[in-house]
Image: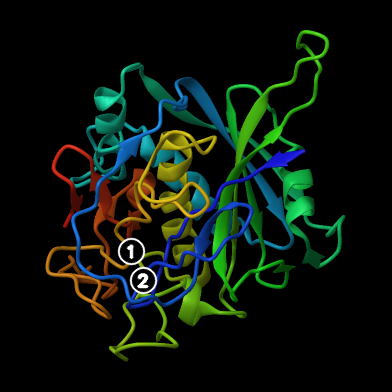
Amino acid sequence: MASFATSNVVLFLVFLVSLVHFNAEARWLAESDQTEQPLLFQYHNGPLLTGKISVNLIWYGKFKPSQSAIVSDFINSVTSSKPTVAQPSVATWWKATEKYYQLSKKPSSLVLSLGTQILDDNYSLGKSLTNQQIVQLASKGAQKNAINVVLTSADVAVEGFCSIRCGTHGSALGSSNGHIKGKSSKFAYIWVGNSETQCPGQCAWPFHQPIYGPQNPPLVAPNNDVGLDGMVINLASLLAGTVTNPFGNGYYQGPKEAPLEAASACPGIYGKGAYPGYAGDLPVDATTGASYNAHGVNGRKYLLPALFDPSTSTCSTLA
């Protein structure tokens, strides 16, 4: 049985945080009248993800090899310490999550690595998925010391996709294999959809014209794929939320049913000087004209969201 909590992560909208109740750790798409107030993050004494954690990718639907490489390279970039990776790097961005561990009463190291990749390009559950089916797909990955990431292709509809969210993170009860009889453990999962043909204005901003708010020209996607570059933004945000609030009782602000997390507390901010409708001052690739703020492995460039710094109560950007 799945266990959910609600999270607001607005990717593109100007007036940002929705407190709509939905049983899932989700990236929400909604407008609100949020006023400028200091964010007061609290640690709710629950576990954070620690130790060696594999990030398993479950590909549902049709993805080109070049598309899957964008995501797998991002995961490999998170913990890369290769000196050949230019700065600022994806690993530098991810290092900001360590502050949450340092401030908790139970500091511990976390090491992420790319795990197993599972392909389901035959649409085993059809092309219209419910929340429970997302959990079913997530359960295909290893459930111990893992985060299982379900990635749905552009032709797959998912309950709530585009209308209220671009992705989800939550937890579910794993199988009892290998556990003490009568007891079961939870595993963390993430779902992100490819919005390229369904709602790029909601879920792939700033690489597509937004539906609401100021109509500034969209940025050029760093990997030349609006849908996949948008998925990386959403995945990055949800990954930060997953490790710092995996089971709904870690770090967050606001009500448990609709918490603001490490990245969802800083929606629409990618560089310094960001304001509603403007992602911020970002580097631009001289050859492609693409905007980015982080370097990855294999010469990749990515645009990653700001993360909330719990030590300063501000949104911290790479650029």
Residue 85 percent location from the top left of the image = 25, 41
Q: What element carries label 1?
A: loop
Image position of 181 (left or right of 155): right
User: Which of the two marks, 2 or 1, is nearer to us in this view?
Assistant: 2
User: How many angstroms separate mark 2 from mark 1 (CA)?
Assistant: 7 Å
Residue 201 disc label = none
Q: Residue furthest bottom?
A: 215
Q: In this view, does 227 lie above or below 197?
A: above
In which quarter of the view is residue 38 placed? bottom left
Name which residue lies at 36% across and 19% down.
109
Q: Where is residue 113 in the image (x, y as percent from the top left)?
A: 48, 30
| Residue 115 place in picture, x, y as percent | 59, 31
The residue at 19%/63% (across/down) is: 271
Quarter of the image with the N terminus is top right
Q: Residue at x 49, y 71 (%)?
A: 29
Left or right of residue 122, residue 207 in this image: left
| Element class at badge 2 | loop
Which mark is drawn over residue 16?
2
Residue ID for mark 1: 267
Up-down relation of residue 64 to residue 120 (above or below) = below
Q: Quadrant of residue 37?
A: bottom left
What's under tag 1, amino acid-wise?
Answer: Pro
Q: Which amino acid does label 2 sit on?
A: Leu
From the viewer's side, name the closer residue of 45 and 99: 45
